[in-house]
Image (tube, grey):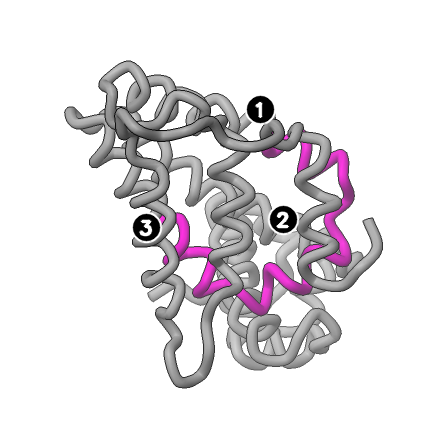
């Protein structure tokens, strides 16, 4: 449980540790509220649920877009940590599968937030996140598994990114983990086999990821 920081005159005691804890408390609570009520949920609801004053929320995040961007970056860092661990696993194929499963678990859990963020986080932010943080790690997983002979040779890192994006939307109230069925099908298709023909077309470029995410959620890039 995140430690709650009591309300008071924060200007009189600007402790960096206190500020960091309050910021994380707001981010964690906002993730829950946005998932339930969407991006238009009021700051007063975030503050009430976090047990802090609404003024604290506004001081940390004066603009709503700042809060959404910070929350997006926080969740991406979680995926990056998973990817980093996946690249160190002894078996390249197991590491790749482990990453895909854990990344999907996180994305599905944050589905409401992800759908809201696609309307707010701009293309440059998605490109920077993909290229500088996740991109190199996913590329390393692909190279390792291909060198091991377990991953088909014509798969690109962006193929995995696109597939994660699509599968994270495959869930229903009756089967909240329906995505696991399609992950199994996807993994079967990723396996290298001697009788495989080449994949049609080429993998999308990094620049296309934001547009595809917008298309998926019915918004404009």
Q: Quadrant where the N terminus lies?
A: bottom left
| Residue on which the image places disc 3 | 101
Tell which residue pokes out farthest to the bottom in this image. Answer: 174
- Please state the horizontal and vertical placement of residue 69, each as a whole percent of the image: 67, 49
Q: Nearer the viewer, residue 108 or 186?
A: 186
Residue at 66%, 40% in the rendered image:
209
Mark 2 vs 3, N-terminal side: 2
Circle 3 residues within 10 Å: few <14, some 14–19, many ≥20: some
Tell which residue pokes out farthest to the left in this image. Answer: 90
SS type, badge 3: helix
| Residue on which the image places disc 1 | 132
Q: Nearer the viewer, residue 171 or 53?
A: 171
Residue 35, visible in the rendered structure: yes
The disc label shown at residue 113, or none: none
Residue at 30%, 19% in the rendered image:
144
| Residue on which the image places disc 2 | 70
């Amino acid at each position: 449980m995140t430690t709650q920081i009591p309300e008071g005159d924060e200007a009189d005691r600007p402790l960096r540790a206190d500020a960091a804890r309050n910021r994380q408390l707001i981010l964690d609570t906002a993730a829950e509220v946005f998932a339930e009520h969407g991006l238009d949920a009021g700051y007063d609801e975030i503050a009430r649920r976090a047990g802090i004053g609404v003024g604290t929320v506004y001081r940390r995040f004066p603009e709503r877009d700042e809060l959404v961007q910070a929350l997006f970056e926080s969740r991406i860092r979680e995926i990056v940590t998973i990817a980093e661990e996946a690249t160190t696993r002894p078996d390249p194929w197991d590491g790749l599968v482990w990453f895909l499963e854990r990344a999907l678990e996180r994305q599905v859990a944050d589905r409401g937030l992800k759908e809201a963020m696609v309307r707010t986080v701009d293309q440059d932010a998605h490109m920077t996140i993909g290229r500088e943080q996740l991109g190199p790690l996913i590329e390393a997983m692909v190279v390792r598994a291909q060198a091991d002979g377990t991953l088909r040779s014509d798969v690109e890192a962006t193929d995995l990114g696109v597939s994660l994006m699509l599968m994270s939307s495959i869930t229903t109230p009756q089967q909240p983990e329906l995505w696991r069925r399609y992950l199994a099908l996807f993994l079967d298709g990723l396996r290298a086999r001697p009788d495989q023909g080449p994949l049609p077309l080429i993998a999308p470029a990094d620049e296309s990821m934001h547009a595809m995410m917008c298309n998926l959620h019915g918004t404009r890039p």
